[in-house]
């Protein structure tokens, strides 16, 4: 595992591996409260101390479950982030069906309402704190501003985040997105502490290297690397033709690249998911890697992968073949 030093803004220690709590919102399949608690127990016992959630995840279910668990831990022992941009509002007319359109197995008794206004950002934080049952979160991200309207979302949302930080209500602020355009625009405001780069800096592809990462280096903005398995493509030792990429079928050229990377990894005694987890931390701007996990076994396995030894020769070979950047 690459060496880890102070990897957080304003003294926040994010650690090399964080837990992304979308699964606690019943992403793809329902889990019970007890199962969710067991997943979080496994994360805590594995040394994970950074947890990320959002109102979007299960229409608040992820925040409620995560908050109940973290309420049993010393507040100074963990770092917590959530997101703003989607307010949750009653929707009784859809309460008899599931939130299938967003892939969460929860009743759609609430709806998401886009709101990046100053008032909306502040209300979103207040409502998240109520669901979490906690007094504060450490990091607040604008969530997917490009899915609303990027220019107006950033124009109102980023100053609103900065005001909350000035008031001491959060320690750090950022933008979380899979859009390099949105991430770059956020960094260029010179306001952010962090960006959550989802799927754009992974072992199989690195579009964030074109402009986002250089801008982060120049301005001192830290990167939280998320979706590093590219929706499952890199999560198994040998990617199959049925692997998922960007929540859809994997394109043939991406599959060929992933399989060649896997072959080189195998020659060096390293499983593909181990390399996928550790690759982002080779970039100094990356502060942590955030991954999910629907079962305790998955969480423990990812923690072990992050601790596994990876020979430097592997990265040199992948670089020599043009499979990863130097």
Image (cartoon, rainbow, N blue to C red):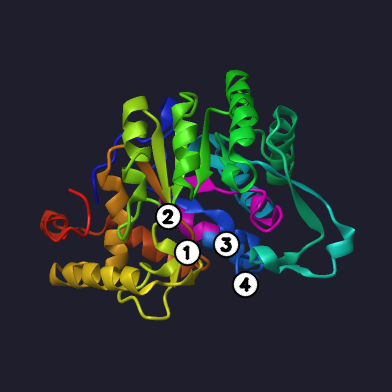
| Residue 72 picture location, percent across and down | 60, 46
Mark earlier in primary sequence (4, 2) = 4
What residue sits 80% from the left and 70% below the top?
97
Label drawn at residue 29: 4
Q: Secondary structure at mark 2?
A: loop
User: Can you identify the residue that label 3 sits on?
Assistant: 23
Q: Quadrant of residue 250?
A: bottom left
- Give the Cα distance between marks 1 and 4: 18 Å
- Closest to the camera, between mark 3 and mark 1, is 1
Q: Quadrant of residue 34?
A: bottom right
Between circles 3 and 2, the one closer to the viewer is: 2
Horizontal relation, residue 109 to residue 116: left or right = right
Callout 2: few (<14), some (14-19), or many (20+) C-alpha neighbours within 10 Å? many
Q: Is residue 212 above or below residue 91?
A: above
Looking at this view, name the residue that lies furthest to the bottom.
241
The secondary structure type at the circle numbered 1 is loop
Task: State the residue position of label 2.
Answer: 199
The part of the chain drawn in magenta is 40-63
Please rate how many residues cluster around mark 4, counting C-alpha atoms within 10 Å: few if below 14, some from 14 to 19, many from 20.
few
Q: Which residue is mark 1?
A: 246
Q: Earlier in the sequence, mark 3 or mark 1?
A: 3
Contact (Cβ within 8 Å) of mark 3 with mark 2: no
Which one is in front in this view, the residue at disc 1 or the one at disc 4? 1
Depth check: 105 or 256 in front? Answer: 256
From the image, state whether disc 4 or disc 2 is nearer to you: 2
Residue 66 relative to residue 323: left or right: right
State the residue lying farthest toward the top.
166
Say which quarter of the image contains residue 234: bottom left
């Amino acid at each position: 595992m690459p060496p880890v030093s102070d990897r957080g803004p304003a003294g926040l220690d994010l650690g090399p591996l964080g837990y992304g709590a979308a699964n606690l919102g019943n992403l793809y399949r329902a889990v019970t409260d007890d199962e969710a608690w067991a997943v979080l127990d496994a994360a805590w016992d594995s040394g994970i101390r950074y947890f990320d959630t959002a109102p979007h995840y299960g229409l608040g279910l992820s925040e409620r479950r995560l908050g109940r668990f973290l309420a049993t831990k010393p507040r100074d022992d963990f770092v917590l982030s959530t997101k703003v941009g989607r307010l949750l509002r009653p929707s009784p007319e859809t309460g008899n069906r599931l939130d299938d359109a967003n892939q969460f197995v929860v009743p759609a008794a609430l709806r998401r309402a886009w709101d990046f206004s100053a008032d909306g950002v502040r209300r979103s934080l207040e409502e998240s704190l109520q669901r979490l049952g906690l007094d504060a979160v450490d990091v607040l991200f604008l969530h997917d501003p490009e899915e609303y309207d990027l220019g107006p979302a950033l124009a109102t949302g980023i100053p609103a985040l900065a005001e909350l930080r000035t008031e001491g209500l959060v320690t750090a602020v950022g933008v979380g997105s899979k859009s390099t355009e949105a991430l770059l625009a956020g960094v260029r405001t010179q306001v952010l502490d962090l960006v959550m780069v989802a799927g754009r800096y992974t072992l199989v592809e690195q579009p964030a290297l074109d402009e986002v990462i250089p801008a982060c280096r120049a301005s001192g903005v830290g990167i939280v690397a998320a979706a590093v398995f590219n929706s499952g493509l890199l999560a198994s030792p040998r990617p199959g033709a049925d692997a998922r990429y960007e929540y859809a079928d994997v394109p043939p050229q991406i599959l060929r690249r992933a399989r060649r990377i896997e072959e080189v990894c195998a020659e060096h005694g390293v499983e593909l998911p181990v390399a996928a987890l550790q690759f982002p931390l080779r970039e100094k701007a990356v502060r942590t890697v955030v991954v999910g996990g629907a079962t305790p076994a998955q969480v423990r396995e990812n923690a072990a992968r992050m601790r596994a030894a990876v020979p430097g020769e592997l990265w040199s070979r992948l670089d020599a073949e043009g499979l990863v950047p130097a």
